Amino acid sequence: MLSHGWGRWPVIRGDLLPVTSPAAAARLVSAGPAIARGLGRSYGDSALAAHMLDMRPYDWLIDFDPDTGRLQCAAGTTMDDIVSVFLPRGWFPAITPGTRFVTVGGAIASDVHGKNHHHHGCFSTHVDSIDIMLGDGSVLTCSRDAYPDLFHATCGGMGLTGVVLRATLRLVRVPGSHIAQTTRKARNLAHALEIFQAVRGATYSVAWLDCLARGELLGRALVTTGEHVAGPRMAVPPRALPVPFDLPGVVLNRHTVGAFNRLYYARERSARAERTVGYAPFFYPLDGLRDWNRLYGRAGFTQYQCVIPHEGAMAGLTAVLERIADSGKGSFLAVLKELGAANANPLSFPLAGYTLALDFRIEPDLAPLLEALDAIVLAHGGRVYLAKDARMSADTFRRGYPAWERFQAVRERYGAHGRFASVQSHRLGLEAW
């Protein structure tokens, strides 16, 4: 069958093999190199392979402690499952990415982060233990105390250490399902970074950014903060509107995207606006459009997400935005967030600094632009997120992730080489072709 990530590019032919039990997983792992796959929300090729282990059937809740919020669940359990069951009880994921359609196993493999990384770190920060199947079919329970090298390599390891079967994680108490949201208008990038510093005490912070604005308006943004507030505990999100067909590629160009960005920025008339919103539009705005990846046309798209440390952020982000504006290939979905300190996981993405994420429609002359962005990011001490990547070179990867050799040593130690591989792992030189 033909398979792809959320960006719908690249497309490969591979087998999707359902995992329904540990025995089924062991049987499939013994058959040859494979990669675990959840809901397919990684944007690029990190969960693509000739043999993909479909973890969606492996999706049950095992145990929950209502006093501590500690949840044990199978790896195919989704963020949507967790929110649906536990938000009515006053609990919420400590860390959630921008979609609720991601599995726990995928969240661990990508070590996802959310709008609160500057305070609460990555998903792995709130994971106590992981049951992982190794290349020989055996299962180890790893944690920060038991097999810590395997635990840290698995968190952010893109499925290359083994198959996550279940995990124990900690949810957080919340007073209701709504968010007190404050949006501030930033005149340009410098002003946006000033606002981020001023609102550092907020639990959640994120900015939409106009990546086609130029000159004194370069990087103008809407910076949004949020806090959980008391109220009802409703877990049913608004009904998603469908995107019924692939948008013609010609529709997305510098003129249409520029017009959208101007209108979106102007929609906030005041310098500061406060409102109360539901959890779904705050945490998962794009989930309100079903199959929104069709907006980029049949050729698909790639999301470019980089992080640049604080000391180089203003210069680095300015250079990135100028290069994008010059190209005219900007995105109407450009997100800026502040990240906190890096963790001990060798392939985890965040660094203390700012992360910028935006989408590019796949077209013939895109590669030189992204390579130019790679050079800017590396020159300012940053790196590119593996969960979004579909085209980074092995050299760019190694320079951005200097602990990659430590990661490879852990894979060697636990027999992962030749057993767990993806298109991405081959491209980045972590597995031989």
Image (cartoon, rainbow, N blue to C red):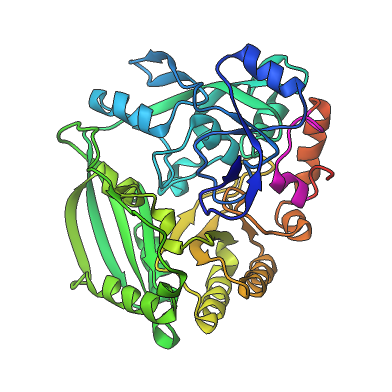
Q: Residue at x 60, y 25 (%)?
A: 164
Q: Nearer the viewer, residue 152 or 57?
A: 57
Q: Residue at x 57, y 52 (%)?
A: 388
Whether 284 is drawn above or below 89: the answer is below
Question: Which quadrant of the view contains residue 86?
Answer: top left
Say if residue 252 shows up in the picture: yes
Q: Name the side, left or right, on which 150 lies relative to 16.
A: right
Whether 261 is drawn above or below 238: the answer is below
Q: Nearer the viewer, residue 365 or 106?
A: 365
Q: Residue at x 64, y 42 (%)?
A: 48
Q: Nearer the viewer, residue 410 or 21?
A: 21
Q: Is residue 140 magenta?
A: no
| Percent of width and height locating residue 291 | 39, 50
Say if residue 172 shows up in the picture: no
Q: Is residue 417 magenta?
A: yes
| Percent of width and height locating residue 93 | 39, 33
Q: Name the side, left or right, on which 81 lies relative to 366.
A: left
Whether 334 is drawn above or below 39: the answer is below
Q: Name the side, left or right, on which 271 lies relative to 18.
A: left
In this picture, which residue range is highlighted in magenta? 416-428
Name the quadrant of the C terminus. Answer: top right
